[in-house]
Amino acid sequence: MQNEVMFAGFGGQGILMCGKILAHAALEEGSEVVWIPSYGPEMRGGTAYCLVITSDKPIASPIIKNPANLVAMNLPSIDKFAPEVRPDGVILINKSLANVSSGRTDVDEILVPVTEIAIEVGSVKAANIVALGAFVARSKIVDFDVLKEMVKKEFSTKKKFLDLNMNALERGRQAAL
């Protein structure tokens, strides 16, 4: 079965890292994976998004018009991508920066104050990991324990940030339950 996740937000929010960690978790589980990053010329502060496609079969095309899921870290991302999500998908909204609904009744929508949770665990920079934890806990796209291992691996060379991000991941999981 093929599954797609669009991560979107401002440049500097760690959008591409979220996608990369999810892609590594899916690879670890034996899935076929495509990770396609994209960002505007402004980078920090501009629009950034990435698409992660996972499948138990070879992926025929990396071009997806209607992804199954969306993690939207800001209002412009909701406006742009939420209408494209397929019915029965998951839309996770960063309630801290966009306390609005997508207006969709045919998806599983979850509003999580990811920025506030990240500040509580020690750094606003961990908001992306909070969002990733909440999204995976809700969607079950990969096993949460595998995701934890990939976050550990991502921060293995930055040990001073490891505990912070592991706490952010767990707080995200709790927010989604």
Image: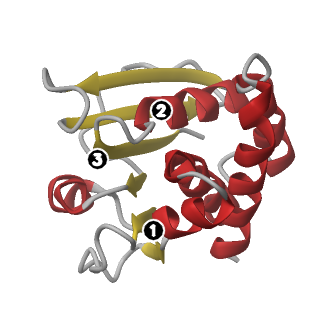
| Residues marked 3 and 1 touching at CB (< 8 Å) | no
Find numbered disc 2 in the image and state the secondary structure of the residue it sits on: strand
Question: From the image, which quarter does the C terminus lie in?
Answer: bottom right
- Residue type at mark 2 is Val
Structural distance between the alpha carbons of marks 3 and 1: 12 Å
Q: Viewer-proximal residue, 4 or 73?
A: 73
- Viewer-proximal residue among 17 and 91: 17
The disc at residue 111 is none
User: Looking at the image, is mark 2 or mark 3 nearer the viewer?
Assistant: 2
Which disc, if any, is residue 88? Answer: 1
Label 2 vs 3, first from the N-terminus: 2
Q: Quadrant of residue 26?
A: top right
Query: In the rendered view of the protein, which quadrant contains the N terminus?
Result: top right
The residue that label 2 is drawn on is 52
Q: Which residue, given by chain and number where applicable, does mark 3 sit on? A: 66
Residue 57 in the image: above or below residue 110 = above
- Residue 82, can we see it? yes
Q: Amino acid at mark 3?
A: Asn
Report helix, strand or loop for mark 3. loop
Q: Earlier in the sequence, mark 3 or mark 1?
A: 3
Q: Image quadrant of residue 140?
A: bottom right
Depth check: give the residue in front, 84 or 117: 117
What residue is at 79 percent from the left and 50 percent from the top? 144
How far, Cα to Cα, is label 1 from label 2?
A: 18 Å
Please state which amino acid type lies under the numbered disc 1. Answer: Asp
Horizontal side of residue 72 vs 146, given as left or right:
left
Point out the tag, 1 or 2, that comes first from the N-terminus: 2
Around disc 2, counting alpha carbons within 10 Å, would you say few (fewer than 14), some (14 to 19), or many (20 or more)?
many
- For the residues labelled 2 and 3, the Cα–Cα distance comes to 12 Å
Residue 142 pos. (x, y %):
72, 45
